[in-house]
Amino acid sequence: MAVKEKRRRSRLFNRVWRCRYLYLLFLPVFIYYVLFRYAPMWGLAIVFKDFRPFLGFAASPWVGLTHFQNFLTSPMFWNVFWNTIILSLLGMIFVFPASIILALLLNEVRNMKFKRTIQTISYLPYFLSTVVIVSLIHSILSPTMGPVGSLFRSMGREPINFLAQLQYYRTIFIASDIWASIGFGSIIFLAAIASIEQSQYEAAIIDGAGRFRQLVHITIPNIMPTVVIMMILRW
């Protein structure tokens, strides 16, 4: 048995050594996920503690499922629950397809300077933090100093405080999500479109297919695997 175990370990070592460069390529990704994805998950234990800043994370007392019980029995639970479901559905309907539509439109643009300009403008919000984006939205929609308030006053109307009106919340939330994510998503879908074999388009042109038919029968079917993966990663 000892001899068999030694041989098995020897074969395993040989296989690892033959693929050593592949493992070296994988190593940075492995380290990244360990340090920034799995190690921080220890912080999730805070939901089972009565966290007190002066005591610190480790010294704060354990309270078990008390926070979950308080949340589930709260009168606001169902309101929060259904609002989350509705926002997720609205995001699936409006936010996610926006990147696909922008990528398809940019793919039809032949003026490369204009195309790069639109890509740059749409991609810029991706580099901004959520705090900056919320601050920008607050400044834009401000009824006193924002451009929207100034527009209302120029038309002789009283400015509306959109951020204080409940009926506008979902619209503002979805619009800001589209603005923040449409650029990054469109780049991924443009890359998927660029990987489509040009011979398919050439065959379609020979068969008399116009741009719309090429879009429907070639472009969209070929990027569907990417669409599915991005949808899974988003939700």
Image: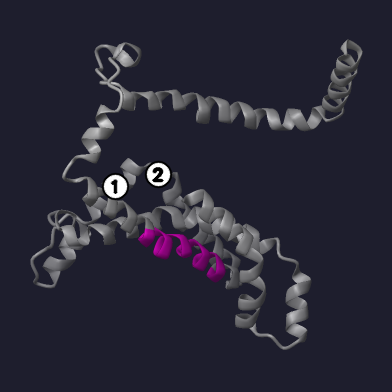
Q: Which residues are magenta?
A: 89-105
The residue carrying mark 2 is 128
> Going by the image, does 187 lie left or right of 18?
left
Report x, y in % for residue 202: 77, 77
The residue carrying mark 1 is 134
Give yes or no for residue 103 being in the magenta stretch.
Answer: yes
Magenta residues: mostly which secondary structure? helix
Q: Amino acid at mark 1?
A: Val
Residue ID at (48%, 56%): 183
- Earlier sequence position, callout 2 versus callout 1: 2
Assess disc 1: are there few (<14), some (14-19) or many (≥20) residues with their C-alpha within 10 Å of its C-alpha: few
Q: Is residue 123 above or below residue 64?
A: below
Report x, y in % for residue 187: 56, 56
Q: Is residue 210 above or below residue 180?
A: below
Report x, y in % for residue 38: 52, 28
Q: Is residue 103 above or below residue 233?
A: below
The residue nearer to you, when weighing 175 against 62, is: 62
> Going by the image, does 9 lie left or right of 194?
right
Residue ID at (46%, 51%): 235
Report x, y in % for residue 130: 35, 43
Q: Quadrant of residue 229?
A: bottom right
Residue ID at (57%, 26%): 34
Q: Quadrant of residue 14?
A: top right
Q: Amino acid at mark 2?
A: Leu
Q: Quadrant of residue 106?
A: bottom right
The residue nearer to you, when weighing 232 against 2, is: 2
